[in-house]
Image: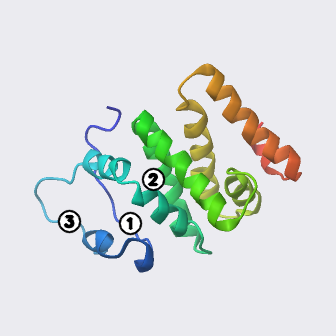
Amino acid sequence: MLYDDLSIGPIDLCDSVCGEFCEPFRSSQPPPPGPKMDARIGLEYIIENNDYVNKLGLALDTNNVTVKKQIFELLSTLCAFSANGYKRAIETLEHYKSIKGERYRLHLVVSELDKATAIEYQIALLAFVNCVIISAGSLKDRIRMRNEFIGKCVFCGSRGSEILM
């Protein structure tokens, strides 16, 4: 496992998406001393429960850059965590594509990269792109994902292609 001693930090997804699940993380005060919450448990829960693909996909449909940044960070972590986590991250993009009626699953990532002004958000997006490419199962899959990103950038004519190359 890559993440043996990670702690889950505060997250702030909208109530309509995660409801009671996020309640323990809403406190602005640091957690009390004691055992840390193991991130593996939360990641495995997301991987085992397909409903989270829908919830994360719906949560991406917001104008709140902070929420999207946190979701892309979570998706990056899922990619690096395991092959099943990678599969869930890709399924989340597919779900978003279907609810928005988009043609390409990577449209959101490339368009967000193109219009993002916050450096932290750009970093999260590029980290996600890297995780998707690096975490692909084989060299052939890595090349295919890289080409899919580059092809989407060139097709759109976005500045994202300059950043990705």
Image position, residue 12 (x, y; %) = 41, 71
Mark nearer the N terminus (2 vs 1): 1
Image position, residue 72 (x, y; %) = 53, 55
Q: Which residue is drawn at 67% across and 35% down?
A: 145
Tell me if mark 2 has few (under 14), some (14-19) or many (20+) residues whose alpha carbon lies within 10 angstroms of its own: some
**Hey, which quadrant is residue 34 in on the image?**
bottom left
Image position, residue 14 (x, y; %) = 45, 76
Where residue 11 is drawn, which disc sits there?
Answer: 1
* SS for callout 3: loop
Q: Name the residue tied to disc 3.
A: 31
Q: Name the residue tied to disc 2.
A: 74
Q: Residue at x 70, y 34 (%)?
A: 146
Mark nearer the N terminus (3 vs 2): 3
Mark nearer the N terminus (1 vs 3): 1
- Left or right relative to 61: residue 25: left
Q: Quadrant of the C terminus?
A: top right
Q: Nearer the viewer, mark 3 or mark 2?
A: 2
Q: Rounded to the nearest whole Å, what is the CA distance between mark 1 and mark 3?
A: 13 Å
Label pair 2/1, CB-CB below 8 angstroms: yes
* SS for callout 2: helix
Extreme-top residue of the structure: 139
Image vertical order of residue 103 relative to residue 86, above or below = below
Image vertical order of residue 81 relative to residue 43, above or below = above
What's the amino acid at mark 1? Ile
